[in-house]
Amino acid sequence: MLLFLTDYHLESARLILSLDSALKPFDLNASEHIQKAKDLIEETGYKRRLPELEYLEELL
C-alpha cells in the first residue's frame, strides 16, 4: 500500500502545480506532497518514481 500512497502524493503534487492558482483558496501545498513522496520512496526503495520526483522538485 505504501507504493500506492507514493503514487498518490506524486499525482497530487502534479495536480496542484498544474492548477496552482485555482487551488490557492484551499491552502494545498505541493511541496508537502513532494516531501512525503520522497520520504516514502526512500523508505520503500521505490526507485522507479525517482525521475518523476526530481521533475516535480524542479517545477517548484
Image (cartoon, rainbow, N blue to C red):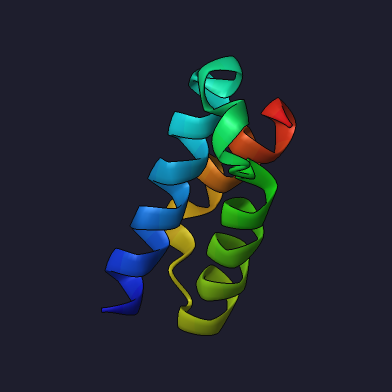
Quadrant position of the C terminus in the picture = top right
Q: Nearer the viewer, residue 27 or 57?
A: 27
In the image, taking residue 16 as reference, residue 11 lies left or right, namely: left
Give percent across and percent down for residue 7: 35, 56
Q: Nearer the viewer, residue 59 or 21?
A: 21
The single residue placed furthest to the front in the displayed view is 25
The single residue placed furthest to the bottom in the displayed view is 43
Tell me which corner region of the image, top left, top right, bottom left or bottom right, holds residue 6.
bottom left
Give percent across and percent down for residue 36: 58, 66
Give percent across and percent down for residue 42: 59, 75
Q: Is residue 18 above or below residue 54?
A: above
Quadrant position of the N terminus in the picture = bottom left
Q: Nearer the viewer, residue 36 or 44?
A: 36
Mark count: 0
Kindly identify the residue that appears in the image at 49 percent across and 20 percent down: 19
Give percent across and percent down for residue 44: 46, 81
In the image, taking residue 51 as reference, residue 5 lies left or right, namely: left
Kindly identify the residue that appears in the image at 43 percent across and 69 percent down: 46
Q: Is residue 57 above or below residue 39?
A: above
Tell me which corner region of the image, top left, top right, bottom left or bottom right, holds residue 38.
bottom right
Kindly identify the residue that appears in the image at 59 percent across and 30 percent down: 25
Q: Is residue 59 above or below residue 21?
A: below
Q: Nearer the viewer, residue 24 or 4?
A: 24
Tell me which corner region of the image, top left, top right, bottom left or bottom right, holds residue 58.
top right
